Image (cartoon, helix red, strand yellow):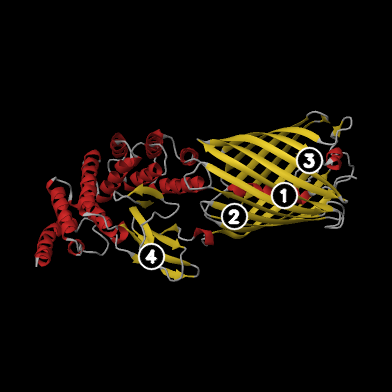
């Protein structure tokens, strides 16, 4: 009986949250409401609803619910306890709020998610701010993602930040940064330290780009 | 007896050096060309055809290269060689890389008639910042006209990479009983000594940019104890890759005698075409990688397709999950010897994990790893 009531409550609250989650690049083909109600553990379902409600009340944009939902579902898939899921969602919510501030004025959902990931692996907060300043009118989700990958591969955050910022200042495209990231991955697999690999390929791309003065305004497109 | 010149060994020495790389590739290539070879103190120049077949298989932890080569000539330059080299590391993030290998050669006027050599080496590398250091040891035995000799070598060195340039320097201490080989190189012993003691100091600089690769090596050789030696040799080589399948290789210079592998000294000028018969194909995970997951990303007009390949038993249950599936497990399907799934990913950052038989979720190899807040890890990938 208790279970049935909880499920109905969950469906009701979830329905209220659907408007916030959907329309924000929500999960591929899986309705958020269905994802919440599909959580079989009552305690976990309550925690997810509670955390999503708190996130919405805290002023996070609607799109930010999606990474929170994904974090919750990751915990469910990994059979984490409701306590762990609450802790993970709470920590992610804080990172999303921080990223929302740093990437102001109007970050996209992808930028928010990538920014939160970047903060999670140790990218300095000021780097996010500088990246936004370098490209105030276009999405920097790919740049943030590449930076996160580099730091996750043990490139010192300060070094990775400087390289990505320098490349952005020279007008490097997301595809060029991704290609650099792939090349770094190959070199690391071949025995080079991540830092040396980044140095090598970062400079390589830099040599193909025009000097900073020639790209003034290029990041404002 | 004059030591036999063996041009093919020079070529295979070049072929085996890049076995240390550990990228996720498979490659089979053929080198075909010609070389003009002149040994110190000999008036004649030998012209030989060179054919070498090389197979390379690697994943992020282990790289293996097997090379077979033959030199065809009308005189003593004829020879054949088989070489196996491998490099391996404990984990993808480990700065330590261990290399080892063996080679065997038969040489003589009529192939296999005059004798041969056998050698092995082991080397440990430690990456430090943009370079690293290494120490190594090698042992070789040579037989010519039923006279056997042994040689040993211990080397230490370091390398440093700046942009497209890489420089290295090393010191090698050699001991050799191969008197015919070293006498032919005009190195002599005093008194009743029967063992050569040599020290080589070598420097190497190479430049790689786009399709161009140029390398210059200078080696200084000096004698110790009863050995009289004072030589220096410069060798320059270049590779131009004009398509993923074809490269052109040239080299010229003096190569000092290598007693460990029984290679006489020689002035060499060579040119060859390299054909990649199986160029850079995605690897079939090796049996020793059982349980490991490999990924590759193929860009599409919008987003990319992530191919996940896992080596596991026929009856296993293999699943992949990630932010792309709301962490709902997606089963892999059996294709040949592995389990596979192809996943369309939209642009953005994605987290991916795999598991076998309901076990712990793991980050696939080759992906950046991030902690998952739940005591495990996931792979992180960015799709432009």
Establish if A75 lies above or below B123: below
Q: Residue at x 40, y 43 (%)?
A: A150
**Which one is earlier in the sequence, the residue at label 3 or at label 2?**
2
Tag of residue B11: 1
Name the mark on residue A105: none
Left or right: A208, with B69 as reference point: left
Q: Is residue A78 visible?
A: yes
**Foreground pick, A28 / B184:** B184
Q: Can residue A172 be seen here? A: no
- Of all chains, the one bearing label 1 is B
Given the image, what chain letter belongs to the residue carrying mark 3?
A: B
Element at label 3: loop
Q: Nearer the viewer, mark 3 or mark 1?
A: 3
What residue is shown at x 43% (from left), y 66% (from top)? B340
| N-terminal label among 3 and 4 | 3
Mark 3, mark 4: which one is toward the viewer?
4
Given residues B318 and B322, the one toward you in this image is: B318
Secondary structure of the residue carrying tag 4 is loop
Residue B357 numbered mark, or none? 4
- Give the class, few, some or many, for how many residues have Cα within 10 Å of label 2's Cα (few <14, many ≥20): few
Badge nearest the viewer, 4 or 1: 4
Q: Which residue is mark 3?
A: B257
- The Cα atoms of the two marked residues, 4 and 2, are separated by 43 Å
């Amino acid at each position: 009986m208790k279970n049935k009531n909880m499920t109905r409550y969950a469906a009701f609250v979830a329905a209220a949250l659907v408007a916030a989650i959907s329309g924000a690049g929500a999960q591929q083909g899986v309705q958020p409401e269905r994802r919440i109600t599909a959580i079989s553990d009552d305690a976990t379902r309550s925690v997810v609803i509670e955390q999503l409600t708190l996130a919405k009340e805290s002023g996070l944009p609607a799109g930010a619910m999606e990474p929170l939902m994904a974090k919750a579902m990751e915990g469910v898939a990994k059979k984490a306890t409701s306590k762990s899921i609450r802790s993970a969602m709470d920590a992610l919510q804080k990172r999303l709020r921080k990223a929302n501030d740093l990437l102001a004025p109007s970050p996209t959902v992808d930028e928010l998610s990538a920014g939160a990931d970047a903060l999670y692996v140790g990218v300095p907060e000021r780097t996010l701010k500088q990246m936004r300043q370098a490209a105030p009118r276009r999405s920097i989700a790919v740049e943030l993602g590449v930076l996160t990958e580099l730091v996750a591969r043990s490139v010192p955050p300060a070094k990775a930040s400087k390289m990505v910022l320098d490349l952005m200042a020279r007008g490097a495209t997301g595809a060029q940064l991704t290609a650099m990231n792939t090349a770094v991955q190959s070199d690391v697999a071949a025995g080079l330290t991540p830092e040396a690999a980044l140095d090598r390929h970062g400079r390589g791309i830099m040599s193909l780009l025009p000097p900073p003065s020639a790209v003034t305004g290029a990041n404002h497109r | 007896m004059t030591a036999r010149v063996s041009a093919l060994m020079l070529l295979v020495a070049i072929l085996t050096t890049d076995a240390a790389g550990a990228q996720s590739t498979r490659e089979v290539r053929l080198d075909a060309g010609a070389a003009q070879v002149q040994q110190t103190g000999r008036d004649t120049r030998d012209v030989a055809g060179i054919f070498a077949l090389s197979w390379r298989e690697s994943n992020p932890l282990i790289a293996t290269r097997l090379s077979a080569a033959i030199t065809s000539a009308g005189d003593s330059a004829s020879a054949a060689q088989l070489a196996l080299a491998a490099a391996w590391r404990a984990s993808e993030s480990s700065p330590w890389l261990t290399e080892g290998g063996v080679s065997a050669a038969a040489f003589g006027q009529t192939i296999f008639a005059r004798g041969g050599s056998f050698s092995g080496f082991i080397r440990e590398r430690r990456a430090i910042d943009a370079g690293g250091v290494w120490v190594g040891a090698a042992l070789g035995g040579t037989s010519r006209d039923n006279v056997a000799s042994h040689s040993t070598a211990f080397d230490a060195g370091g390398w440093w990479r700046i942009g497209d340039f890489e420089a290295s320097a090393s010191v090698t201490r050699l001991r050799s009983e191969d008197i015919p080989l070293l006498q032919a190189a005009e190195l002599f012993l005093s008194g009743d000594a029967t063992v050569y003691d040599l020290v080589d100091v070598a420097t190497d600089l190479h430049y790689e940019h786009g399709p161009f690769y140029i390398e210059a090596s200078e080696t200084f050789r000096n004698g110790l104890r009863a050995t009289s030696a004072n030589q220096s040799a410069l060798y320059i080589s270049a590779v131009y890759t004009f398509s993923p399948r074809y490269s052109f290789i040239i080299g010229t210079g003096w190569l000092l005698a290598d007693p460990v592998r029984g290679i006489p000294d020689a002035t060499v000028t060579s040119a060859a075409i390299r054909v990649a018969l199986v160029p850079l194909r995605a690897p079939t995970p090796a049996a020793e990688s059982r349980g490991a997951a490999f990924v590759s990303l193929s860009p599409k007009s919008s987003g990319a397709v992530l191919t996940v390949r896992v080596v596991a038993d026929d009856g296993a249950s293999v699943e992949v999950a990630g932010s792309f599936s709301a962490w709902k497990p997606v089963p892999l399907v059996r294709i040949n010897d592995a389990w596979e799934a192809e996943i369309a990913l939209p642009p953005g950052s994605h987290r991916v994990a795999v598991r076998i038989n309901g076990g712990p979720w793991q980050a696939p190899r080759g992906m950046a790893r991030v902690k998952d807040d739940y005591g495990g890890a996931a792979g992180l990938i960015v799709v432009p």
